[in-house]
């Protein structure tokens, strides 16, 4: 008997063929396996029916860690009298179309960790990888994914490595990153007159780290700045980077060490240990000074390269591992660039990084994992669509930019690019677009961007488009569509809450109730408009926003806090005079900021979301003492209620006031969304935008929506914030283009 099997999904470049070879052999089957052009794998196995069933079972259950099987097609045919099982070469023509099969960078596997411990050729070798692990996306220049097309092309395999590479029974069969101490990349340590090479370089770096020094460490997608998470070292790092409060990510040796500093639920442990090894936000158990000031959680990740494992052989403490970049600029990937940052020492290796990629960030809310940033470990894996799309390229907004490519039934998003207010970040976006266009063989039919006339992405979209249509998509419509399309729904009432998006009326929207059918939308409700005195300054200094909302009522309070205005009283006078001519905003983020200011939690936004994040951290220990009933007039939510109620109850616990304020926002948004969903006759309610990361607000909205019998949706494969908005823009553009 013979079975012809087609497997689709991420099955190339992940050690799938040697795996098939091994299980076929172990089941005593004959036949072949080969890579297909569209990214799938074709298998024929001949032999005993029972053994074929066993083979199919193993294929599903024991697949290599990085492989993702989407479908398995099986057809039984007459035997062909194969003599043996072999791995056949994929036809040259087939190699041209591997777009969906370039895997992301994947954490070192258990077998490679044990090689580092024991294997003679790889003992303490930092770049130990196999077909199941190692860098992929960050080293690949072009497809097909062959060594010559990666930054490993500079290293010629030695005799022993070659033997592994050519042996189908070996874990390193066709492992494009295969290397050993003898032939692979070399590691160095330098700084302050010290220079070390190989293993010694790593041990020296550990010594310096333990000594409280700052070491720049070359990772997969760029450099990290590292130091032990102890007061003096962390303060030195803060000084070096000019970052007073922004939380630093931590790397811990293992989950045991994670448990010493954080609370770790079962589901969280699973994400932490997954092959993507993201940074996971975990609730603090122990306060490590200056690591994440005034927040209730740490960003924590586990080691994901051989080098990280080697470092934790000597260091039994949590390490800060923060992306090395100059303020506002992309993560540094080149060895000469890193010198500019002024770390004490550098631990680096002589293999180039081709594509930058920051660490991904995830937060678990209830049982939902939400992406705050989707990058290393996930990019360039596609998001599957439930429709066939035209080729659309979308450029995102201005903050946390990613670009998106819709093609057939897939959406590909670039790695995290960052905020486009620096020339270098814009260059990075252009490079990433070029790279994705190349690996996807992508020719756009249309380009989508934000509606904001002055965003760099808007202007770049126009410039790139030439004769192609350009679709300028309203920001919150894109947010809602992004959550709808990921969940495969065609119409919904959306709650889009974030910091800022350009509105149809030129005001700064950000607390919107939107009814959407993907291609069309209607703004059916929003938070009350208030002036933003000084525009962007009202974002940076939340007290300004408080003035905007309460006006003269808050005069005394604000004058008492004059030290938080760079120009003191003069500036406050100006703020009150500016009010009438200010741009207006319905932003939920700005309301949260102003509450944070009223409760004296935060008076300066030194990093994105700071006042609202600190408010959330305080509110966690509170309860609803104000119990404010939602006040909604003609689809407009009165947010001033919160402030008036707090002012009357200033003597109450800050935690409770913070909690009550968040509760009002959640209640009123849910109430209005349900009312509008009812009017429109839809059962779907989606939540999107950066404020959705607030655990309390998200949970309360979900509870209320479900209690009233509506279905609740949110993004789980893409960020809720602007990091996923290019996807929303793209799906809207596709729909408009088609109709
Ligand atoms: Zn491995
Ligand atoms: Zn070698
Ligand atoms: Fe947004």
Image: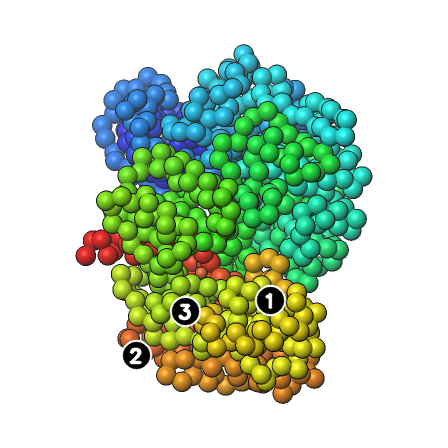
Question: Regarding mark 3 in the picture, which secondary structure is present there?
Answer: loop
Q: Where is residue 210 in the image (x, y as percent from the top left)?
A: 78, 39
Question: Regarding mark 2 in the picture, which secondary structure is present there?
Answer: helix
Q: Which residue is disc 3 drawn over? A: 507
* Between discs 3 and 1, the one toward the N terminus: 3
Q: Position of residue 3 (x, y in %)?
A: 29, 31
Q: Say which residue appears at 41% left-offset and 54% top-offset.
A: 455
Residue 19 in view, yes or no: no
For residue 363, above or below residue 100: below
Q: Left or right? Give the position of 100 relative to 324.
A: left
Q: How crowded is mark 2: few (under 14 residues within 10 Å), some or many (20 or more)?
A: few
Q: Nearer the viewer, residue 412 or 164?
A: 412
Q: Which residue is disc 2 drawn over? A: 679
* Between discs 2 and 1, the one toward the N terminus: 1
Q: How crowded is mark 1: few (under 14 residues within 10 Å), some or many (20 or more)?
A: many
Q: Say which residue appears at 43% left-offset and 24% top-offset.
A: 149
Quarter of the image containing the N terminus? Answer: top left
Ligand 2 image-quadrant field: top right
Question: Regarding mark 1 in the picture, which secondary structure is present there?
Answer: loop
Q: Say which residue appears at 73% left-offset and 36% top-offset.
A: 344
Quarter of the image containing the C terminus? Answer: bottom left
């Amino acid at each position: 008997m013979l079975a012809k099997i087609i497997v689709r999904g991420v099955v190339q470049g992940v050690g799938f063929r040697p795996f098939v070879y091994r299980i076929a052999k172990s089941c005593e089957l004959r036949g072949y396996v080969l890579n297909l052009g569209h990214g799938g794998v074709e298998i024929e196995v001949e032999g005993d029916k029972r053994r074929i069933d066993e083979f199919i079972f193993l294929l599903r259950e024991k697949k290599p860690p990085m492989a993702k099987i989407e479908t398995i097609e099986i057809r039984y045919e007459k035997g062909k009298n194969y003599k043996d099982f072999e791995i056949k070469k994929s036809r040259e023509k087939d190699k041209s179309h591997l777009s969906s099969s370039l895997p992301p960078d994947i954490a070192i596997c258990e077998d490679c960790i044990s090689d580092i411990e024991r294997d003679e050729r790889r003992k303490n070798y930092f770049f130990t990888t196999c077909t199941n692990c190692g860098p992929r996306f960050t080293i690949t220049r072009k497809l097909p994914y062959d060594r010559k097309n990666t930054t490993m092309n500079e290293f010629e395999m030695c005799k022993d490595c070659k033997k592994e590479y050519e042996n189908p029974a070996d874990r390193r069969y066709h492992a494009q990153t295969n290397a050993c101490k003898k032939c692979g990349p070399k590691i160095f340590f330098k700084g302050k007159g010290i220079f070390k090479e190989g293993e010694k370089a790593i041990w020296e770096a550990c010594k310096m780290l333990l000594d409280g020094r700052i070491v720049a460490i070359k990772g997969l997608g760029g450099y990290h700045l590292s130091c032990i998470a102890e007061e003096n070292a962390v303060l030195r790092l803060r000084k070096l980077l000019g970052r007073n409060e922004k939380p630093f990510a931590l790397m811990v040796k293992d989950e045991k060490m994670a448990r010493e500093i954080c609370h770790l639920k079962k589901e969280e442990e699973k994400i932490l240990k997954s092959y993507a090894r993201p940074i996971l936000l975990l609730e603090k158990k122990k306060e490590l000074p200056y690591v994440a000031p005034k927040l209730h959680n740490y960003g924590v990740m586990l080691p994901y390269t051989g080098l990280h494992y080697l470092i934790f052989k000597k260091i039994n403490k949590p390490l800060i591992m923060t992306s090395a970049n100059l303020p506002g600029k992309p993560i540094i990937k080149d060895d000469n660039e890193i010198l500019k940052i002024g770390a004490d020492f550098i631990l680096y290796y002589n293999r180039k990084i081709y594509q930058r990629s920051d660490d991904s960030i995830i937060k678990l809310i209830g049982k939902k994992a939400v992406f705050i940033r989707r990058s290393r470990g996930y990019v360039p894996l596609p998001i599957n669509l439930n429709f066939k799309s035209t080729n659309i390229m979308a450029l995102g907004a201005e903050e946390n930019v990613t670009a998106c490519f819709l093609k057939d039934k897939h959406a590909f998003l670039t790695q995290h690019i960052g905020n486009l207010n620096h020339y270098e970040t814009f260059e990075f976006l252009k490079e990433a677009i070029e790279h994705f266009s190349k690996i996807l063989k992508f020719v756009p039919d249309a380009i989508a961007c934000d509606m904001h006339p002055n965003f760099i992405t808007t202007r770049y979209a126009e410039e790139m488009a030439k004769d192609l249509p350009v679709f300028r998509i309203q920001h919150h419509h894109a947010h809602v569509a992004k959550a709808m399309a990921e969940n495969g729904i065609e119409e919904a009432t959306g709650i889009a809450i974030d910091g800022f998006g350009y509105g149809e009326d030129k005001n700064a929207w950000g607390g919107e109730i939107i009814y959407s059918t993907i291609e069309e939308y209607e703004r059916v409700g929003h938070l009350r408009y208030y002036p933003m005195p000084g525009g962007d300054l009202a974002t940076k200094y939340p007290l300004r926003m408080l003035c905007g909302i309460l006006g003269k009522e808050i005069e005394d309070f604000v004058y008492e806090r004059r030290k938080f205005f760079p120009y003191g009283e003069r500036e406050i006078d100006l703020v009150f005079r500016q009010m009438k001519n200010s741009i207006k905003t319905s932003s939920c983020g700005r309301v949260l900021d102003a509450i944070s200011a009223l409760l004296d939690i935060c008076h300066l936004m030194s990093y994105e979301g700071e006042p609202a994040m600190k408010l959330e951290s305080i509110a966690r220990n509170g309860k609803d003492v104000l119990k404010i009933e939602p006040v909604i007039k003609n689809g407009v939510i009165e947010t001033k209620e919160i402030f008036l109620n707090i002012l009357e109850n200033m003597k109450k616990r800050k935690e409770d006031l913070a909690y009550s304020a968040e509760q009002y926002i959640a209640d009123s948004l849910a109430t209005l969304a349900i009312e509008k969903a009812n009017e429109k006759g839809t059962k779907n309610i989606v939540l999107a935008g950066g404020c959705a990361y607030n655990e309390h607000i998200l949970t309360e909205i979900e509870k209320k929506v479900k209690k009233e019998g509506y279905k609740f949706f949110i993004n789980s494969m893409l960020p809720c914030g602007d990091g996923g908005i290019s996807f929303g823009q793209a799906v809207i553009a596709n729909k408009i283009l088609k109709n």
